[in-house]
Image (cartoon, rainbow, N blue to C red):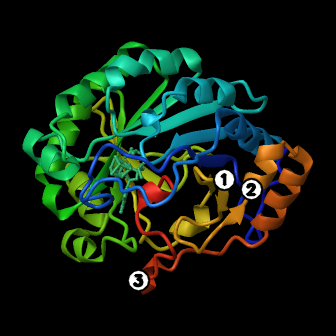
């Protein structure tokens, strides 16, 4: 089925489902003071997560990404993965994680049905990693990623936020990192949120800094797959892995938007940098699949053409931990 098309002809095969707002890291651009509880921690239950996934899968979504906050802080994560993987129509079950205890957990996630792993690593330099995340865990995170590769997980990627602090030296380290490892490292251009305006002014660099650096060293663009999302990836014959860029400030970025988001509190977000959301929680609590599909379809008709980040407007997004990025 292929019902999820918005008013601009964009099709949606991809849902990002946040399962918690809680995080154990203190990334400088996201939660520099750590997670602060401002409301009861009542997030979607595994059964409610499954109902969300079932509704979107019936409307044609085949790829689900579990995110947060930090999804691995939930003890019932393996159950959520298993319930997601069992929904008919779902072919990819992905997670975005900071890699906390990844080496101990990845086997269980794989057994539960995880297909795609994205690990966030902003720097391969131990001290810089500590400075950015607040934790001296770089070697453990990399060990977890290598464990995922050794288990044969089909799709392993690294996400790194592109910040002034790590350009050039960071590019060198990451290209070396993928010389033998068959992973894609994708830099995300730093996005301005409600909480990080000062940091953004100091640390934002345009994505072209990365793509120019790579092109000067013989890296070329590779063709995109249909559910790739708005990432550009570059390859080089001497390297097993790829280096990519997600550049939300680039012209046309929103034209290829293929993703929808549901927050850990059951709100459908049509744009990461929009306002409010459409509440689904009441229908998830009572299990009302037909009404849920109708509400989702109605909401999609109002998806905006694009974000207003260029005007310095981040909507009501204070930081990405709120909605999962
Ligand atoms: N905690 C998990 C993690 O860090 O992988 C999942 C949630 S995190 C919000 C999802 C992704 O958003 C991470 O890769 C993170 O680096 C990225 N991110 C967070 N804040 C960002 C910002 N202001 N600009 C660009 N990327 C950001
Ligand atoms: Fe936590 Fe991820 Fe935000 Fe870092 S980017 S503070 S790991 S939610």
Q: Which residue is mark 3?
A: 312
Residue 187: percent from the left, percent from the top? 33, 52
Q: Is residue 75 above or below residue 53?
A: above
Give the number of the mark in front: 2 or 3: 2
In this view of the protein, which residue sits in the foreground, 282 or 4?
282
- Name of the residue lying farthest toward the left: 127
The residue depicted at 73 percent of the width and 44 percent of the height is 52
Q: Earlier in the sequence, mark 3 or mark 1?
A: 1
Q: Is residue 104 above or below residue 210?
A: above
Local SS, label 2: loop
Distance CA(mark 2)–CA(mark 3): 29 Å
Give the number of the mark in front: 3 or 1: 1
The residue depicted at 47 percent of the width and 69 percent of the height is 317
- Name of the residue lying farthest toward the bottom: 311
Distance CA(mark 3)–CA(mark 1): 27 Å
In this view of the protein, which residue sits in the foreground, 209 or 259?
259
Local SS, label 1: loop
Mark 1 and mark 2 in contact (Cβ < 8 Å)? yes
In this view of the protein, which residue sits in the foreground, 49 or 246?
49
Asked if residue 238 can be seen in this view, the reply is: no
Q: Which residue is mark 1?
A: 266
Q: Is residue 161 left or right of residue 115?
A: left
Q: Earlier in the sequence, mark 2 or mark 1?
A: 1
Local SS, label 3: loop
Q: Which residue is mark 2?
A: 280
Q: Mark 2 Cα within 10 Å, few/some/many (few <14, many 20+)?
A: many
Which quarter of the picture shows residue 277?
Answer: bottom right
Which quarter of the picture shows residue 303?
Answer: bottom right
Residue 163: percent from the left, percent from the top? 22, 61
Q: Is residue 46 left or right of residue 315?
A: right
Which quarter of the picture shows residue 304?
Answer: bottom right
The residue depicted at 77 percent of the width and 46 percent of the height is 284
């Amino acid at each position: 089925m292929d019902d999820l098309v918005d008013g601009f002809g964009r099709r949606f095969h991809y849902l990002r489902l946040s399962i918690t707002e809680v995080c154990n890291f203190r990334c400088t651009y996201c939660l520099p003071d750590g997670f602060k509880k401002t409301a009861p921690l009542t997030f979607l239950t595994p059964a409610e997560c499954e109902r969300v996934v079932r509704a979107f899968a019936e409307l044609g979504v085949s790829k689900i990404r579990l995110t947060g906050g930090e999804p691995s802080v939930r003890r019932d994560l393996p159950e959520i993965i298993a319930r997601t993987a069992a929904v008919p129509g779902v072919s990819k079950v992905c997670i975005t994680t900071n890699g906390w205890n990844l080496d101990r957990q990845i086997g269980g996630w794989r057994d539960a049905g995880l297909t795609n792993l994205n690990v966030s690593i902003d720097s391969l330099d131990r001290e810089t990693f500590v400075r950015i995340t607040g934790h001296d865990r770089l070697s453990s995170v990399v060990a977890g990623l290598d464990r995922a590769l050794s288990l044969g997980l089909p799709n392993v990627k690294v996400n790194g936020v592109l910040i002034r602090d790590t350009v050039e030296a960071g590019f060198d380290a990451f290209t070396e990192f993928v010389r033998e490892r068959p992973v894609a490292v994708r830099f995300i251009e730093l996005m301005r949120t409600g909480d990080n305006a000062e940091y953004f002014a100091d640390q934002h660099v345009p994505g072209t800094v990365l793509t120019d650096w790579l092109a000067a060293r013989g890296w070329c663009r590779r063709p995109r797959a249909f559910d790739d999302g708005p990432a550009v990836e570059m390859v080089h014959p001497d390297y097993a892995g790829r280096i990519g860029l997600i550049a939300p400030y680039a012209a046309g970025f929103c034209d290829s938007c293929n993703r929808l988001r549901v927050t850990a509190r059951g709100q459908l977000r049509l744009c990461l940098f929009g306002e409010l959301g459409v509440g689904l929680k009441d229908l998830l609590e009572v299990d009302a699949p037909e009404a849920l599909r109708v509400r989702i379809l109605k909401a999609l008709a109002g998806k905006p053409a694009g974000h207003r980040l260029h005007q310095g407007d981040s909507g009501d997004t204070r930081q990405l931990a709120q909605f999962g990025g």
